[in-house]
Image: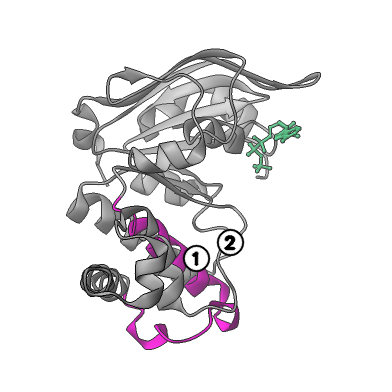
């Protein structure tokens, strides 16, 4: 699928000369790339290449020792994850981070908290304005549930759901924040073929229908090459490739470091 036309938008996020160390371990060394508005941008690379560290820098979990991160034209100083979330950056995790005992609906509602204006006390007491606001948020969450085709599990505790559906609920929780930039850490990991196809369709639909910019880490090369506009390739914390799927696939450095492995 030729998606490169999407990749001509303005720059939403730019990373310049990012270096991140943990003691003596160089997780990222002098990495620069950007994410354009409206595109699907993939980060690939072998195990330990620095992909998750990169996402963690983007959403404020990690603070690189060197380099600059500019989001929507503003170069940030040190930033916390909740500030990234307030600015419209949401993410899912490699290991599902849901409340296992809570229903699908309630889990997705937690993604909505950031947008709730009334205080916790008012919400707990179901006071007039709080009740009205909660109804609006619930309606929004129901739309996400419809969109992700998970009506049948809206009341089921997520711990009882198969893995593929839990991943879908986690996507729903991230979407509930109405993100401008959605970071997906291995959204298809551990899925069977059918679950992967479903997830691919939802990722593409989120991008198309909501205009959400997406940056994803994914090991399945078929998926990456099919759905991404542009791909950045990391190896041992360094950037070794950056371009359209076709450009990356043809790069000798990438073939040697990544595609040539059994990964
Ligand atoms: N919090 C941390 N403390 C110490 N070292 C870390 C930390 N986070 C990452 N690292 C190290 O940084 C390097 C990059 O790890 P990272 O998890 O970013 O790679 P990855 O490409 O996401 O790997 P994988 O595909 O296995 O998830 C590794 O050597 C890892 O051990």
SS type, badge 1: helix
Find out whether the residues at labels 2 and 1 contact each other: C-beta distance under 8 Å. Answer: yes
- The residue shown at (26%, 70%) is 147
Q: Which residues are magenta?
A: 149-178
Residue 230 appears at what percent x and percent y? 36, 32
Magenta segment's dominant SS is: helix
Question: Label 1 crowding class (10 Å Cα cut-off): few <14, some 14-19, many 20+?
Answer: many
Tell me the quarter of the picture where residue 104 sits.
bottom left
Residue 252 appears at what percent x and percent y? 54, 21
Q: Earlier in the sequence, mark 2 or mark 1?
A: 2
Give the CA distance from mark 2 to mark 1.
7 Å
Q: How is the image coloured?
A: one colour
SS type, badge 2: loop
- Point out which mark residue 167 bears: 1
Residue 159 is inside the magenta segment? yes
Quadrant position of ligand 1: top right
Left or right relative to 114: residue 58: right
Residue 2 appears at what percent x and percent y? 24, 41
Left or right relative to 175: residue 38: left
Left or right relative to 236: residue 44: left
The residue tagged 2 is 96
- The residue shown at (43%, 37%) is 83
Left or right relative to 45: residue 201: left
Residue 153 appears at what percent x and percent y? 42, 85
Would you place residue 39 above or below residue 220 in this image? above
- 18 or 254: which is nearer to us? 18
- 168 or 128: which is nearer to us? 128
Residue 228 is inside the magenta segment? no
Ligand 1 within 8 Å of the CB at mark 1:
no
- The residue shown at (19%, 34%) is 5
- 166 or 235: which is nearer to us? 166
């Amino acid at each position: 699928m030729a998606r490169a036309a999407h990749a001509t938008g303005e720059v939403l996020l730019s990373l310049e000369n990012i270096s991140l160390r943990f003691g003596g371990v160089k997780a990222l060394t002098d990495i620069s790339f950007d994410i354009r508005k409206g595109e699907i941008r993939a980060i690939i690379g072998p195990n330990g290449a620095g992909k998750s560290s990169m996402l963690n820098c983007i959403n404020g979990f990690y603070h690189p020792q060197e380099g600059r991160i500019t989001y929507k034209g503003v170069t940030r100083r040190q930033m916390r994850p909740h500030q990234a979330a307030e600015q419209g950056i949401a993410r899912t995790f490699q290991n599902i981070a849901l409340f296992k005992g809570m229903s699908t609906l309630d889990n997705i509602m937690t993604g909505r908290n950031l947008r709730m204006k009334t205080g916790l006390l008012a919400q707990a007491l179901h006071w007039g304005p709080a009740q009205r606001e909660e109804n609006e948020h619930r309606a929004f969450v129901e739309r996400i549930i419809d969109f992700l085709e998970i009506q049948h599990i809206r009341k089921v505790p997520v711990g009882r759901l198969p893995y593929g559906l839990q991943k879908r609920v986690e996507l729903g929780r991230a979407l509930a924040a109405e993100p401008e930039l959605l970071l997906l850490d291995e959204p298809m990991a551990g899925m069977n073929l059918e679950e992967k196809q479903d997830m691919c369709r939802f990722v593409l639909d989120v991008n198309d229908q909501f205009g959400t910019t997406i940056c994803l880490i994914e090991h399945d090369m078929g998926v990456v090459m099919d759905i991404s506009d542009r791909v950045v390739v990391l190896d041992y914390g360094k950037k070794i490739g950056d371009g359209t799927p076709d450009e990356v696939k043809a790069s000798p450095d990438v073939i040697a470091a990544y595609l040539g492995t059994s990964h």
